[in-house]
Amino acid sequence: MAKGKPKLKAHHVNRDWCKGCGICVHFCPKNVLELDEAEKAFAARPDDCIACKLCEIRCPDLAIDIETE
Amino acid sequence: MAVKDYIRERFFPHMWCPGCGHGIVLNSLLRAVEQLGMSKNEIVMVSGIGCSSRIGGYVDFHTLHTLHGRALAFATGVKLSRPELNVVVPMGDGDALAIGGNHFIHACRRNIGMTAIVMNNRIYGMTGGQFSPMSGLGISASTAPYSNIDRAFDVSEMARAAGATFVARTTVYHAQQATEFIKKAFLHEGFAVVEILSQCPTHFGRRNRQGGAADMMEWFKENTVPVGSKKKLENPALIERGIFVQKEEPEYCSEYAKIVDKAMRG
Ligand SMILES: Cc1ncc(C[n+]2csc(CCOP(=O)(O)OP(=O)(O)O)c2C)c(N)n1
Ligand code: SF4
Ligand code: SF4
Ligand code: SF4
């Protein structure tokens, strides 16, 4: 990753708030996210994440947080 | 402060349906407040009635939940008595333009310093999917099962014509742009209107076969263009996004203060 860009530390999904709408999954440019059996978002391919935070800013439920280093 | 410090966490998860665009408006608004470094105590959110208006319950500012269509009238009272506060009025398209249409145009005309955010999902979400003045021709609604024959308003055009001094439009797909426009509206001295196209997958999406929340957001991406784009000339059906008006005109509370001063001097 280029210098100066934020580096991913962790995906935090608040499972009590996530309603499984799939917006974050659909619009992730790197196809990192998926819904699990309980219809909650999770990072299936965290290594591909570029920490762009598009999922975080478009989540209608404020349920996803991208922690960067 | 972090975004979460501006909400009343005890009311979450919120009441909006899965994928409701109003949640993204909330998200964008919180980021605007955070990026401007505003204090919770300097913001008053005044809302009416509707799914959109429920946003006031979730933010940890001063909040007033008032009557359907009348939020701008209550907000005008607040602003005139405490002009130093930052007043923001989130409204549904029904709230703002059907029952509240008259308040809306006159607030624009007065140029009173506040921000109106029109959360435009083109339908009455809360009451079960009746058509609104924003639904437009051919749209299916619970009150238009054979399709709507009422033409739609253009909110931004209307705000401009009525005299608003800041007018911008974007969509919840363009959440970062929504944050930028809300920030500019907050800093503007005068009446600011930010129209944000939002999805109601439960009523509008389902009745009009637009798919789920993400599909409706794809529609916002495909059917909007930056203001001034050449594509609009080729396809007039495209909806323009951007800042349409940004100008200085005498602000109502400042003018009122001058009148008070004049009267006091006799
Ligand atoms: C005086 C009055 N008339 C009608 C209603 C019923 N009512 C509640 S919300 C609403 C419309 C909601 O639509 P909109 O403002 O577009 O907001 P949305 O729910 O779509 O966000 C109506 C007609 C009411 N509460 N008060
Ligand atoms: S956008 Fe938010 S609510 Fe929707 S699936 Fe993703 S984390 Fe859950
Ligand atoms: S931060 Fe960007 S790349 Fe990472 S999961 Fe979210 S949308 Fe995908
Ligand atoms: S009915 Fe529509 S506007 Fe109301 S919460 Fe559900 S999706 Fe949102």
Image (cartoon, grey):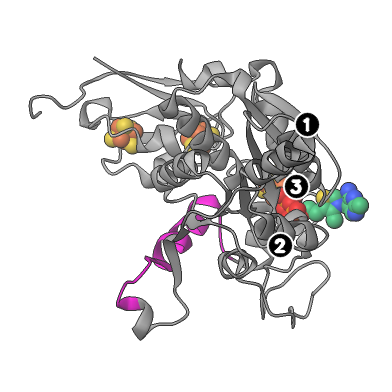
Image location of residue B171, percent across then percent down: 49, 54
Read off the chain for label 1.
B
The answer to whether B98 is drawn above or below residue B198 in the figure is below
Please give the residue where the numbered disc 2 appears in the rendered image: B105
- Say if the magenta span includes residue B225: yes
Q: In which quarter of the image is the C terminus of chain A?
A: top left
Q: Distance between the residues labelled 3 and 1?
A: 11 Å
The answer to whether B22 is drawn above or below residue A41 in the figure is below
A11 or B53, which is in the foreground?
B53
What residue type is disc 2 on? Ile
Label 2: few (<14), some (14–19) or many (≥20) C-alpha neighbours in 10 Å: some
Read off the chain for label 2.
B
Question: Of the residues tagged 2 and 1, which is closer to the observer?
Answer: 2
What residue type is disc 1 on? Leu
Label 1: few (<14), some (14–19) or many (≥20) C-alpha neighbours in 10 Å: some
Q: Distance between the residues labelled 3 and 2?
A: 10 Å
The answer to whether B23 is drawn above or below residue B41 in the figure is below
B261 or B94, which is in the foreground?
B261
Residue B64 is labelled as 1
- Say if the magenta span includes residue B24: no
Q: Are marks 3 and 1 in contact (CB under 8 Å)?
A: no
Image location of residue B245, percent across then percent down: 47, 61
What residue is rendered at 64% in x and 57% in y? B121
Q: Considering the numbered disc 2 on the image, is that residue within a helix, a strand or a loop?
A: helix
Is the residue marked 2 within 8 Å of ligand 1, measured from its CB? no
Read off the chain for label 3.
B
Please give the residue where the numbered disc 3 appears in the rendered image: B72
Q: Are marks 3 and 2 in contact (CB under 8 Å)?
A: no
